[in-house]
Image: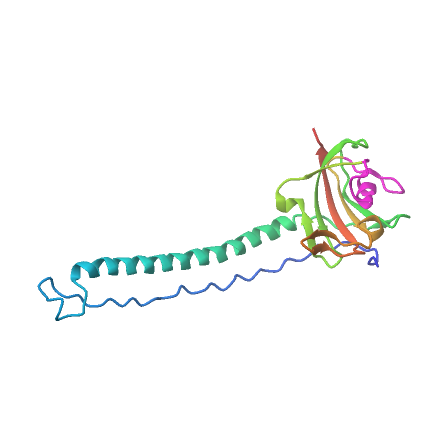
């Protein structure tokens, strides 16, 4: 069931805790004492000095490799933490948008304009470039062009996109069409989205559950050329 129509509040970001880094393991390398060159092989079980030196060097190299592996593991853990911080900013690039009151139309779609565009109205059948952040009603983001760093190119008026997006961008049924440069929020009911079937599935794991209401923050960048 779709939530009651109200203003869309931006999701408050919370700090992401840094992962605890594993301490590099310390290995004690035991080196047997060597015998002098004049020692008789029959009177000592220690290896000769000229043989012990390569063994000690090999053990030292193994120790350095183990230490290097520890640093690499630490770097691998540190990398995602830094990326996650940047990703969070990119994912929620629309949280700074002004709030607006949603208007519900007969189809079940709700929309409001954060900023009305001043450019052209894309004709049906044209390719357009759109930036968006897509969320569930609880604020969980499941897709964002801002994370990918480029807008999505889509064709409107050809039945290739969700019906709720089509109506929300092209207009109709009480919804005015978007103009280039415009920003709009949409609340799309499941009947105009993916319906009862889950979507975004990969190897049995689905990103969007069935009967999901979807919230979109749209920015119509321009007509594809």
- Residue bounds of the magenta highlight: 157-179
In x, y percent, where is residue 121?
79, 32
- Depth check: give the residue in front, 131 or 179: 131
In the displayed structure, would residue 214 be above or below residue 23? above
- Depth check: give the residue in front, 19 or 67: 67
Which residue is at 73% across, 59% downward? 138
Chief secondary structure of the magenta portion: loop
Asked if residue 101 shows in the view, the reply is no
The outermost residue toward the top is 225
Q: Locate residue 64 relative to residue 40 in the image: left or right.
A: right
In the displayed structure, would residue 127 be above or below residue 214? above
Q: Locate residue 118 relative to residue 56 in the image: left or right.
A: right
Tell me where residue 205 sits by quadrant.
bottom right
Which residue is at 45% across, 58% downward? 73
In x, y percent, where is residue 204?
69, 56
Find out whether residue 87 is within the magenta segment. Answer: no
**Quadrant in which the C terminus appears:** top right
Find out whether residue 176 is within the magenta segment. Answer: yes
């Amino acid at each position: 069931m779709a939530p009651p129509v109200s203003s869309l509040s931006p999701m408050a970001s919370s700090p992401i805790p840094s992962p605890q880094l594993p301490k590099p393991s310390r290995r004690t390398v035991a080196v047997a004492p060597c015998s002098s060159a004049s020692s008789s092989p029959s009177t000592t079980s220690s290896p000769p000095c000229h043989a012990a030196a390569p063994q000690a060097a090999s053990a030292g190299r193994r120790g350095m490799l183990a230490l290097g592996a520890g640093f690499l593991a630490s770097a691998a853990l540190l990398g995602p933490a830094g990326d996650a911080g940047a990703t969070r900013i990119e994912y929620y690039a629309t949280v700074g948008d002004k709030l607006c009151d949603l208007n519900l139309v007969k189809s079940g779609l709700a929309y409001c304009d954060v900023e009305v565009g001043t450019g052209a109205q894309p004709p049906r059948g044209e390719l357009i470039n759109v930036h968006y952040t897509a969320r569930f009603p609880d604020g969980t983001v499941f897709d964002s062009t801002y994370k990918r760093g480029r807008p999505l190119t889509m064709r409107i008026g050809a039945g290739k996109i969700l019906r709720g997006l089509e109506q929300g961008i092209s207009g109709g049924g009480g919804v005015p069409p978007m103009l280039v440069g415009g920003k709009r929020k949409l609340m799309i009911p499941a009947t105009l989205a993916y319906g009862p079937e889950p979507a975004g599935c990969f190897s049995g794991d689905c990103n969007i559950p069935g009967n999901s209401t979807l919230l979109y923050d749209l920015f119509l960048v321009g007509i594809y050329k």
